[in-house]
Image (spheres, helix red, strand yellow):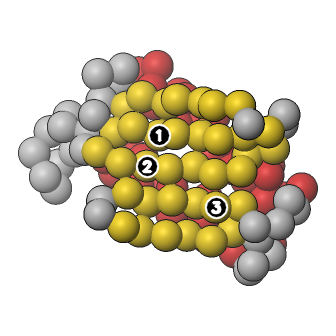
Amino acid sequence: MIRVCVRQKKDSILKVQFFGHADYDVYGSDIVCAAVSSTYFCSVNACYLFHEESILVESSHGVQTILVMDDDANVQKILINMIHCLENLEKKYPRNIKIDKEEE
């Protein structure tokens, strides 16, 4: 299962972490993994287009982390949209993706 952990303060996203595997299908044919990856990369690239230093992306031991460095309104909208897309996937594939939100 892919786990997505979202840390936020009020309506602002501070950090998003992705880890695990969808296990919907075999490697290379997993549509849940492909959808999550596409959503992640499109969102990160869009954030960089608006403000290159607004986020910091880290990858360590299979965990992908997006850290919000600057509370840019456009970047927040992109990240909120990313979470909405992931929530739609979670509704359709509850055995393969789980989103946890924590308030700071």
Three-letter code for the amino acid on which mark 3 is drawn: Leu
Q: Earlier in the sequence, mark 2 or mark 3?
A: 2
Say if residue 60 shows up in the picture.
Answer: yes
**Amino acid beneath label 2:** Phe
Hey, which residue is sitting farthest right in the picture? 73
Q: Quadrant of residue 97?
A: top left
Picture residue at 18% right of the left edge, 37% below the top = 23
| Label 3 SS | strand
Crowd rating for badge 2 (residues with CA inside 10 Å; few <14, some 14–19, many 20+): many
Q: Which residue is mark 3?
A: 67
**Tag 2 residue:** 18
Q: Residue at x 29, y 22 (%)?
A: 95
Query: What kind of element bears circle 2?
Result: strand
- Picture coordinates of residue 74, whole percent (x, y): 85, 58
> Which residue is under mark 1?
4
Q: What amino acid type should be assigned to the residue bearing mark 1?
A: Val
Q: Return the disc, 1 or 2, that comes first in the chain's sequence.
A: 1
Residue 28: quarter of image: bottom left
Chain-order first, disc 3 or disc 1: 1
| Gap between marks 3 and 1 measured at Cα | 13 Å
Q: CA distance from mark 2 to mark 3?
A: 12 Å
* Location of the C terminus (image quadrant): top right
Residue 34: x and y in percent read 34, 51
Q: Judge the density around disc 1: few (<14), some (14-19), many (≥20) Cα neighbours within 10 Å.
A: many
Q: Position of residue 48 (x, y in %)?
A: 69, 75
Q: Report whether 31 appears left or right of 92.
A: left
**Tags 1 and 2 in contact by the CB under 8 Å rule?**
yes
- In the image, what residue occupies the spot 51% across and 59% down? 65
